[in-house]
Amino acid sequence: MHTLLSSYDPVMYSRILTGLTLAFHIIFATIGVGVPLMIGLAEWMGIRRNDEHYMLMARRWARGFVITVAVGVVTGTAIGLQLSLLWPSFMRVAGQSIALPLFMETFAFFFEAIFLGIYLYTWDRFKKKTTHLWLLIPVVIGSSASAAFITIVNAFMNAPAGVTVKDGKIIDISPFGAMLSPAMPTKVSHVLVTAYLTCAFVLAAISAWSLLKGRNHIYYKKALKLTMVASCVFLLASAVIGDLSGKFLAKYQPEKLAAMEWHFDTTTEAPLVLGGILTDNNEIKYGLKIPYALSILAHGLPHAEVTGLNDIPADEQPPLYIHYLFDLKMGFVALMVLIAGSFMVLLWRRRERVFENKWILRGIILAAPLAMMTIEHGWIFSEVGRQPWLLRGIMRTSEGATVSDHVDTMLYVFAALYVVLAFSSVTVLIRMFRSNRAEDEIAAKGIEGGSEL
Amino acid sequence: MSIEVLGITVLWTFLFGYLIIASIDFGAGFFSYYSTITGKRHLINNIIERYLSPVWEVTNVFLVFFFVGIVGFFPDTAYYYGTALLVPGSIAVILLALRGSYYAFNTYGVNKNNRFYMLLYGASGLLIPAALSTVMTISEGGYIEVNNAGKVTFLVRKLFTSTYSWSVVLLALVSVLYISAMFLSYYADRANDRGAFEVVRKYALAWSGPTILCSLLVFFAIRGHNAEHFDRMTAHAPLFVLSFACFLVALYHVWTRKRLGLSFIFVMLQFGFAFYGYGSAHLPYILYPYLTIHDNFTSQPMAIALVSVFILGLLLLIPSLYLLLRLFLFDTKYVQGKRGK
């Protein structure tokens, strides 16, 4: 037992360190992808309605955004290098097969970085207001394209395409074909839309917080309405894409679907298990079984056959705990639907009163961390669900990791780094907005906004 | 030009881009902190801030571009360097992360000119180039051992006790300070800020001598470490002579306080000739003696795809970079601080 505990396993430490870096980076990456779009929406509204409140909204969001971008850039650089440092054997194979989207990502990032620098320093530089808004378009395109390219790499890991494999080795490669993995369309659209959704919720939560504190300026109401309406649109889009993802899994990664739904035997008319716990001999207790639902989810037909774990070799089955991750994630989604739905109903029925409803405001504040947690859970679920593979069917996770010493020490050092960065960035952001509240800035600058919500 | 030479040339060019713009950034961080201690901060801080603010994010991209590109063109580098460089690579990443984020916290946050932030910013400006320069040292061979089973070991002790390794670190440090001071002289002159100009001009002159001395030191240290590389470098001797000539031209202009834009172009040429001279003599090895650009090149279809994407990417980037420079470097009003944000 003692030797077991003290033995150093670089694979395990590499997995934990990569997971830690990504878990931290994904927060800032999500903000980096979604917030530019929201800033653009606000500035566009400001120009369209000729309302200075929206222009200020864009500026204030952009000010906070820079801080998160900085952390996103440096942690993105960290994961970029860690891929080679922790997974050298994997990157050797990835370099041969899926280097193209990684390369494209740096271009997209480059493009975004240049225009973000320009955008931030040219608020009052042009005569026509739309010129400044145009400068944001490359930022929005660049950040979304970055996310898309990185997700394409991940899609390839889940469902390799464009390569010919012989005896577990890649022998023939089509660089563009590798980008068109069957997992790509659903994954990319899911990542993008949920990033937009999360950012809309995060920004909504900030306005809701101010309103809840009794700061009833119309600026916050405008911000809340804009962000919540956007949230509803993105929420609907994520639901549709989420359903398509289930159908993709059934076709290309049946083992992931079977493990996440605890579907042990291949059957037709498969039921969907909600919640529940698994006993030691793989019996489901306390779960809620919805008849036909898994067949519908997987193939759109109640009588369709769904592959069970009995048809997957034992050493290729993902861990069964991903069921909990997935159900937790869906629980978060249900809560978000409830919150956004209630807001829309109240806005429609009672108009102004919705901005005073404390429960709605509290719900919106809750929705922001929920949305971020959903992203984290969804991502961990997807990565763990690919195990034991690193590149599905080609390379196992244990074959891709480094054999170096000191991965454990690096893990502790990076953990400390992320704690420091998280603490500092949150402190800086809070101070920034506390010391300069929107209503104070409006008064100080003598801004006159429209009265229309 | 074969496609593998084209590939390494593209990557080398991006590394050169990083060398120049990151040096400006790193050196500026050090000078910014140094001027606080010597009480000259009020003189030079404005120009440093005005230049760095819009471009800091772009700096990092050059580095990312290089290491993503090299894995694409030469996938085996990921395996060798990745295994060997876990510790030094991680240290460099941590320093870059602290530097980048604290720069943003200091510049955009409320608590400006926090002493601790400034120290981090200044110190990392010297430590990062020192850490990154060791990769160049390692590429000369002798610090990585590969056993029969293909296991890669990094000989840390050997790296830390080697003269060659320390001479490269020294050259990296003084070059950073020299390049940065030369650029800031140009920028201060453009901004018409005489006070700042006189300060940074002194820095530039002070670091010019050490730069040449350290270059010579590395030149001779490499003879002891990798004689084969040294021989090929002497075959490229005209490039190094040109580099020295460019140094003299650049120095002359700063000395006489005339045509500082031209002077900085010559600084870039000085480093350009030396960097490409060193690089072409290094070929065909990427890691002596294990990796060469020929044996460890990616597949033909991937190489063609990467080059095509690179060309398309450049068509997008060059106009964008030009716009950035036009707005913040060539726009006299902005440089002089006469434009609102």
Image (cartoon, coloured by chain):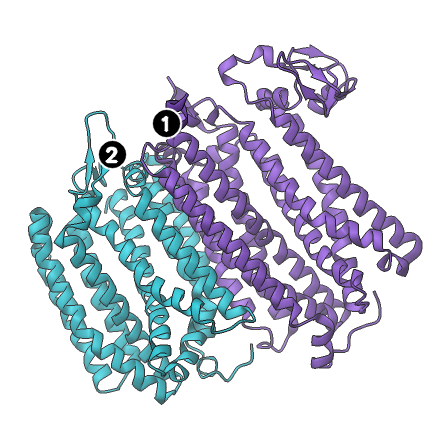
Chain colours: A purple, B cyan
Q: What residue is at 19 percent from the left and 45 percent from the top?
A: B157
Secondary structure category for the residue under label 2: strand
Q: Is residue A376 left or right of residue B214?
A: right
In this view, B72 is above or below A173: below
Instruction: Estimate how packed mark 2 is, as few (under 14), some (14 to 19) or many (20 or more) residues with alpha carbons within 10 Å.
Output: many
Residue A74 location (% of width, % of height): 45, 54
Q: Residues within 10 Å of mark 1 (few under 14, many from 20)?
A: few
Q: Nearer the viewer, residue B341 or B296?
A: B341
Residue beneath the point at 85% across and 47% down: A342
> Which residue lies at the image location 65% right of the left edge and 10% below the top edge?
A265
Residue B242 appearing in the image: no
Q: Which residue is mark 2?
A: B152
Q: Which disc is residue B174 wearing?
A: none
Residue type highlighted by circle 2: Val
* Viewer-side residue, A397 vs A282: A282
The image shows residue A44 at horizontal and vertical percentages of 70, 64
Q: Chain of mark 2?
A: B
| Quadrant occupied by the C terminus of chain B | bottom right
**Residue A7 marker:** 1
Give the quarter of the image for residue A331. Answer: top right
Three-letter code for the amino acid on which mark 1 is drawn: Ser
Residue B216 locus on image (x, y percent): 11, 64
Q: Is residue B97 left or right of residue B261?
A: right
Rendered location of residue B173, percent (x, y): 25, 64
Q: Chain of mark 1?
A: A
